[in-house]
């Protein structure tokens, strides 16, 4: 009986650890000097804590080839948002008071990286972009929450 209880305890502990591990997901996405992200699709689960690192693997400075990672609400008009973002140089190309931004990293230049942590919203397909002027046409992808 004692053995059985021990086994159950171990099993419960293992299960708890597994559940905790799935609560958090770490993602690293790279941006380069050719205006590209290294992934165009990221999948997470609703409610998960997402620890996302944006790594600029290029050499160009922020003023010439800055990158950020911006997660947009569903239904955002990317061209319209991109145009508004281009005018927000003072705010790292994130339009102030924008209702379209779920979360965004800071803007980084070559050799720099930045990390944000957020909770994945409800299930669905969202767009992510780099909002540096002109980049969203190439630097974009789908953030899929299951
Ligand atoms: Zn960029």
Image (cartoon, rainbow, N blue to C red):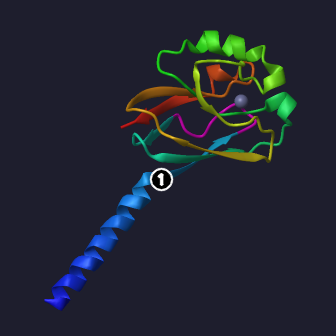
User: Residue at the bottom extreme?
Assistant: 2
Q: Is residue 30 left or right of residue 110?
A: left
| Foreground residue among 73 and 60 | 73
Q: Is residue 137 left or right of residue 88?
A: left
User: Residue at the left extreme?
Assistant: 1
Q: Quadrant of residue 95?
A: top right
Q: Which residues are magenta?
A: 32-40
**Where is residue 76 drawn, in percent x and y?**
53, 15
Quadrant in which the C terminus appears: top left
Residue receiving disc 1 = 24
Q: Does dot 1 land on a helix, a strand or a loop?
A: strand
Quadrant in which the N terminus appears: bottom left
| Foreground residue among 65 and 8 | 8
User: Does ligand 1 reach within 8 Å of label 1's beta carbon?
Assistant: no
**Where is residue 75 drawn, in percent x and y?**
48, 15
> Which residue is drawn at the image coordinates 49% and 51% (left, top)?
25
- The image shows residue 28, relative to residue 134, as above or below, that is below
> Which residue is drawn at the image coordinates 71% and 23% (left, top)?
94
**Where is residue 60 drawn, in percent x and y?**
84, 37
Q: Does the magenta run of residues contain 37?
A: yes
Q: How many marks?
A: 1
Q: Is residue 23 left or right of residue 85?
A: left
> Which residue is drawn at the image coordinates 71% and 39% (left, top)?
32
- The image shows residue 5, relative to residue 25, as above or below, that is below
Q: Quadrant of ligand 1?
A: top right
Q: Does the magenta run of residues contain 144?
A: no
Q: Is residue 139 left or right of residue 34?
A: left
């Amino acid at each position: 009986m004692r053995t059985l209880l021990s086994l159950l305890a171990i099993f419960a502990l293992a299960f708890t650890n597994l559940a905790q591990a799935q609560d958090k997901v770490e993602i690293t996405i790279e941006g380069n000097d050719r205006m590209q992200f290294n992934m165009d699709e990221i999948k997470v689960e609703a409610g998960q804590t997402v620890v996302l690192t944006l790594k600029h693997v290029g050499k160009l400075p922020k003023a010439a080839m800055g990158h950020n990672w911006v997660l947009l609400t569903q239904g955002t008009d990317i061209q319209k948002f991109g145009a508004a973002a281009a005018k927000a140089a003072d705010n790292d190309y994130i339009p102030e008071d924008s209702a379209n931004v779920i979360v965004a990293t800071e803007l980084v230049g070559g050799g720099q990286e930045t990390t944000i942590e957020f909770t994945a919203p409800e299930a669905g397909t969202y767009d992510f972009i780099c909002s540096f002027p002109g980049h969203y046409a190439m630097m974009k992808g789908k953030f899929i929450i299951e």
